[in-house]
Amino acid sequence: MRSAPGGPAGAPQHDPEDDMPLAELDARARADAALRRIRNGSDPAREAFDLANTMNDEAVGRLSGAVRRWFRRS
């Protein structure tokens, strides 16, 4: 377990990404933040649900954008 700079040994390090909305992080950072929260006692099912919803929202947004661009070209 890493300790925060200047903090007590054995204390978990707080990453700024843990406080950011999932939509503002890239996929790897989202997964890392979810794993850290799970290790710190968060509900694994809730973390997986939130992560899947965010990734699904992004995929739908990319797909709908691609369809709109395709129809504009037609």
Image (tube, rainbow, N blue to C red):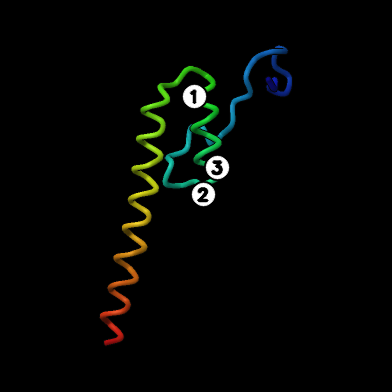
* 14 with respect to 63 (left or right): right
* 31 with respect to 57 (left or right): right
Amino acid type indicated by mark 3: Ala
Q: Residue furthest bottom?
A: 74
Pointer 2 with pointer 3, Cβ within 8 A: yes
Amino acid type indicated by mark 2: Asp
Does 11 appear above or below 51?
Answer: above
- Mark 1: secondary structure: helix
- Mark 2: secondary structure: loop
- Spot occupied by residue 45 in the image (x, y as percentages of width and height): 37, 27
Q: Earlier in the sequence, mark 1 or mark 2?
A: 2
Mark 1–mark 2 Cα distance, whole angstroms, equals 18 Å
Pointer 1 with pointer 2, Cβ within 8 A: no
Amino acid type indicated by mark 1: Ile
Mark 3–mark 1 Cα distance, whole angstroms, equals 14 Å
Residue pointed to by mark 3: 29
Question: Which of the numbered marks, if any, corresponds to residue 26?
Answer: 2
Question: Which of the numbered marks, if any, corresponds to residue 38?
Answer: 1
- Spot occupied by residue 67 in the image (x, y as percentages of width and height): 29, 72
- Mark 3: secondary structure: helix
Does 39 appear above or below 61?
Answer: above
Q: Nearer the viewer, residue 14 or 30?
A: 30
Q: Disc count in the image?
A: 3
* 60 with respect to 8 (left or right): left
Identify which residue is drawn at 33% across, 51% down. 57
